[in-house]
Image: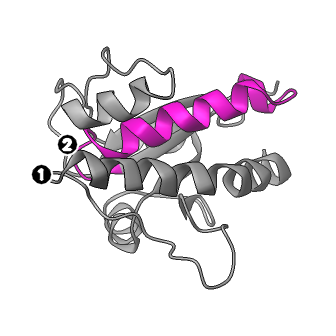
């Protein structure tokens, strides 16, 4: 693997406690099953308005637990320019995340993408924030991300 090239995929949401930790773990799990160089990419998550050191929300932990993925060790972190520079792609949940990232940070052309950007015509591309919602809402968030994973992995495969 070319170590001069960015080797991270950074999944972004607002506070880095609900959506992006779920997306990070699902994407990491999917990439682990791929051939090199995809299986060597590191997947991390951060938030555009995150305070550092907070655990993932209980419902985020619960929905991933049902997938056999342990999120209990997650701690939130804010997005930084260093993280942007180290990232092959920055994958957000909503258009507003993309707008904020491109307004605040120096990014490369095509670097900032949406998690559901590639799911296909007529499908929603945004993943709303489940924070404060029910477990049902968190499960919808999880399913929305799971549906997006094959198309997102395919995109990364073509551009990694």
Which of the labelled discs sits on residue 50, or is there none?
Answer: 2
Q: Secondary structure at mark 2?
A: loop
Q: Determine crowd level at label 2: few under 14, some 14-19, many 20+ residues with C-alpha closer than 10 A.
A: some
Name the residue located 71 percent from the left edge and 32 percent from the top edge. 31
* Residue 23 drawn at (x, y percent): 47, 42
Q: Position of residue 82 (x, y in %)?
A: 42, 36
Q: Mark 1 — residue?
A: 132
Q: Nearer the viewer, mark 2 or mark 1?
A: 1
Compared to residue 87, the image places residue 151 above or below, namely below
Q: CA distance from mark 2 to mark 1?
A: 16 Å
Foreground pick, 130 / 117: 130
Residue 32 visible to the viewer: yes
Q: Main secondary structure of the magenta part?
A: helix
Q: Is residue 33 left or right of residue 18?
A: right
Which stretch is magenta?
Answer: 13-40
* Location of the C terminus (image quadrant): top right
Is residue 47 shown above or below 110?
above
């Amino acid at each position: 693997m070319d170590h001069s090239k960015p080797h991270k995929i950074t999944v972004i949401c607002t506070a880095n406690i609900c959506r992006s930790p779920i997306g990070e773990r699902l994407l990491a799990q999917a990439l682990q099953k791929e051939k090199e160089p995809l299986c060597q990419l590191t997947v991390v998550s951060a938030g555009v308005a995150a305070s550092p050191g907070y655990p993932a929300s209980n419902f985020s932990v619960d929905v991933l637990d049902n997938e056999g993925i342990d999120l209990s060790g997650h701690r939130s972190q804010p997005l930084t320019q260093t993280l942007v520079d180290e990232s092959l792609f920055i994958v957000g949940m909503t258009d507003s995340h993309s707008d904020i990232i491109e307004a605040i940070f120096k990014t490369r052309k095509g670097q900032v993408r949406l998690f559901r950007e590639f799911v296909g015509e007529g499908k929603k591309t945004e993943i709303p924030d489940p924070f404060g919602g029910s477990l049902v809402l968190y499960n919808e968030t999880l399913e929305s991300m799971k549906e997006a994973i094959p198309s997102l992995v395919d995109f990364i495969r073509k551009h990694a």
